[in-house]
Image (cartoon, helix red, strand yellow):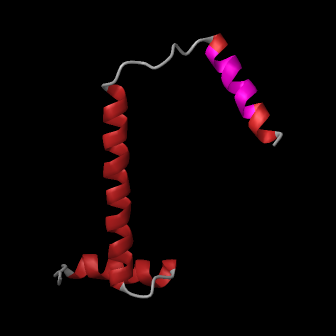
Amino acid sequence: MSTSLPESLKSFVDQQVRSRGYNSPSDYVRELIRKDQDHQHLRGLVLEGASSPPAAIANSDYFGQLRERVGESGQR
């Protein structure tokens, strides 16, 4: 795959490669694509969760039980 960029974007990419330790512009673009994939996946999970019914009521009892579980797992 080949991509053409205007000079201002090419300069920006070159600066990112130099300042952030990428080996090449391709490495930088690959990371941007991976981050976008992660973002899209997370967005899908959030939307799925938002459209699902609540599994438990989040009240003081719920958070108390959660604190107990977290405390127990830290003692192992």
Q: Residue at x 75, y 38 (%)?
A: 73
Is 29 displayed left or right of 66 in the figure?
left
> Considering depth in this image, is 66 or 17 the residue closer to the camera?
66
Query: Vertical placement of 36 versus 16: above or below?
Result: above
Residue found at the very far right of the displayed protein? 75
Residue found at the very far front of the displayed protein? 76
User: Quarter of the image holding residue 17?
Assistant: bottom left
* Overall secondary structure of the magenta section: helix
Query: Vertical placement of 15 versus 36: above or below?
Result: below
User: Quarter of the image holding residue 29?
Assistant: bottom left
Is 8 displayed left or right of 54 in the figure?
left
User: Quarter of the image holding residue 60?
Assistant: top right
Task: Estimate the x, y position of residue 35 in percent, counting from the top left.
Answer: 38, 61
> Considering depth in this image, is 76 or 5 the residue closer to the camera?
76
Query: Vertical placement of 17 versus 42: above or below?
Result: below
Quarter of the image with the C terminus is: top right
Q: Residue at x 50, y 77 (%)?
A: 20
Query: Vertical placement of 70 versus 21: above or below?
Result: above
Task: Estimate the x, y position of residue 14 in percent, counting from the top left.
Answer: 37, 84
Examine the structure image and report whether residue 31 is included in the region drawn in magenta: no
Task: Estimate the x, y position of residue 16 in percent, counting from the top left.
Answer: 42, 77
Q: How many marks?
A: 0
In the image, the segment drawn in magenta is 62-70
Is 65 displayed left or right of 11 in the figure?
right
Task: Estimate the x, y position of residue 4 in percent, counting from the top left.
Answer: 16, 82
Quarter of the image with the N terminus is: bottom left
Examine the structure image and report whether residue 67 is included in the region drawn in magenta: yes
